[in-house]
Amino acid sequence: MGKETNPMATAGPIEGYLKVEPEVTVDGDTVTLDARGVYYRNLNAAVRAAFAEGAKTVNLRNVNGQRYIGNGVSGAGLRIEIDGVPGNDLAMFMDGPTVVVRGNAQDGVGNTMNAGTVYVHGDAGDVLGYGMRGGKVFVHGDVGYRVGIHMKAYENLVPIMCCGGKARDFFGEYMAGGVLVLLGHHTQFESQPLVGGFCGSGMHGGVIFLRGEVEPWQVGKECGIFTAGEEDMKTLRPVVEEWCSEFGEDPSAVMSGRFTKLVPVSHRPYGKLYTNM
């Protein structure tokens, strides 16, 4: 027999990387893909192929920054389990499946998502839920900047995002619809404020719930600041209970805190700044 040749040794580093395909294991309607060293396009093609061939669950192992996982995948009852840290734009344009991340996630989770659910068992980055118009995103820990930006309700779809830790600036920026929740319950930044500045800046729809109090200087002038009442709790409770159920938290302990509600005071906050020609 001739000597086996490693294509990575004979090709350049980029060319060889592009040729790597994920190792595949099939067990009934569950497919496991080993993502170690696999280019993101190759990995995503393998995920789509698995679902096209009848898989109901795709387990991704050794994920290390591969982006666009779950993008455009459609169909209720489908599930993607991720072991590792997925790259940017996880579940972008997704329409129905459930994605579970057993680790942290980078930026852009749920970008323009239509339907489905994403659970992140660690922390997540910036710009979560950009333009999100349906579905749910739950993060166990802390999140970054501009989370919930441009979230919007679409026809009968109401997007929901619940973050269990703390957030940076521009939380809920330009929000146009949906429900955005920040709990400050599971955080690695105990000494920092619950949320940064410009919370709800440009907000003109939807509602933001913050577990705790917020100073007026932290909130965009487009928002009214209220204490959440009994009717608000009816909206909030099932969201918090789902967050607790997935991440093993005590719902009574989380719901015992006081919640602040932010809602827009105008549906056209910058209307007077425009010029009619």
Image (cartoon, rainbow, N blue to C red):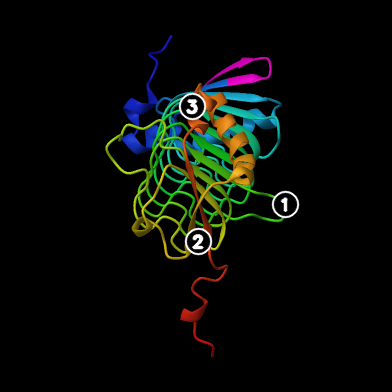
Answer yes or no: is residue 125 visible. yes
Q: Nearer the viewer, mark 2 or mark 3?
A: 3
In the foreground, 273 or 231: 231
Q: Nearer the viewer, mark 1 or mark 2?
A: 2
Q: Nearer the viewer, mark 1 or mark 3?
A: 3
- Mark 2–mark 3 Cα distance, whole angstroms, equals 30 Å
Residue that extends furthest to the bottom in the rendered view of this protein: 277
Q: Earlier in the sequence, mark 1 or mark 2?
A: 1
Q: Earlier in the sequence, mark 2 or mark 3?
A: 2
Residue for badge 1 = 156
Q: Which mark is residue 253?
A: 3
Answer yes or no: is residue 46 visible. no
Residue at coordinates 50% horizontally, 25% vertically from top-left? 247
Q: Is residue 275 magenta?
A: no
Q: Which mark is residue 203?
A: 2
Residue at coordinates 63% horizontally, 19% vertically from top-left? 30
In the foreground, 89 or 248: 248
Q: Is residue 275 above or below residue 42?
A: below
The stretch in magenta equals 21-31
SS for dot 1:
loop
Q: Which mark is residue 243?
A: none
